[in-house]
Image (cartoon, helix red, strand yellow):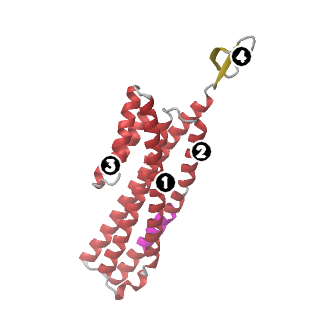
Amino acid sequence: MKKIEEGVADIKEFLEKERDTGIQGNLLYLKQVYEALKNGDLSEYDINSFNSQLESIERQCQQAVLHYQIDMENCFKKLEEFEIGAWIGKGLKKQGEEFRKVLNSFFHYSKYLLLVFQERLVTIYLKTFLPVGKSILRVRINDLKESLRFLERTRKIEEFIEQSLDRIEEFWALFTSEKTENQIKRSLRQDVRRNLRELEEMRERLYESLANFEERLNQLEAEKQVNLVVFMDQDHKQIKEVRMIPAGGSA
């Protein structure tokens, strides 16, 4: 349960930093579910309601992932369209600011993508404390891991960004020595380094959470299954007794 709290805290910390309330509702609900599960006093209605709402949140996460992936690809196309060698005729300062604007959009979408991945993981993790089939949880986590392969794509885009910055610095060194424009160049590099560092930290936390979840799911799958054994009377007309027998155990 501590891992759930840490996952929710990661989401809350990011939202507070970004001052964006777009998914605050889901976050508050996940915290409520967490508190209810921690207390352990759930009615059948509570369990059914939580299952239904968690399903809804997970679908929203899947839709958001597709949305942010498209936004990130669009940003990458815009970055590729910047002809750094032609900046001298368009104004280095103006082109640098436009480049920064697209970069900021890319980093914004990247962070929200990781946030949504974390939110979906917390949602699936909460389901392990509800009467949900473990096989479906395995399917969901495998689907999430497949979605995470897109992060390999984002790393390549980040490499492209760093290479572009190297070209910008080389180009500006040839054509300008103005203090203001050099300050813009340094500021751009600092912003990129800070964002790349934050993205890497978010990825590390996400993969750590994923590893913790898989460890729990493996434990649940390794637990002995329980068979429902029904004992009938001699005439096999009426149920005499019903017992829960561990798999492999004797009646």
Q: Name the residue nearer the viewer: 36 or 119.
A: 36
Up-down: is 32 above or below 70? above
Q: Whole-Å distance between the Cαs marked 1 and 2?
A: 14 Å
* Boundaries of the magenta span: 155-166
- Is residue 179 within the magenta segment? no
Q: Residues within 10 Å of mark 2 (few under 14, many from 20)?
A: few
Name the residue furthest left. Answer: 180
The amino acid sitting under disc 3 is Gln
As helix, strand or loop, the secondary structure at mark 1 comes to helix
The residue that appears at 61% across and 39% down in the rendered structure is: 135
Q: Considering only vertical position in the picture, is 147 above or below 222?
A: below
Q: Which residue is mark 4?
A: 237
The numbered mark, 4 or 1, whose residue comes first in the sequence reads 1
**Residue under numbered circle 3:** 24
Q: Find numbered disc 2 in the image and state the secondary structure of the residue it sits on.
A: helix
Name the residue that disc number 1 marks.
62
Image coordinates for residue 79, horizontal then vertical, percent: 43, 74
| Gap in angstroms between the C-alphas marked 3 and 2 | 27 Å
Q: CA distance from mark 2 to mark 4?
A: 40 Å
Seen from the viewer's position, the closer of residues 83 and 16 is 16
Between tags 2 and 4, which lies in front? Answer: 4
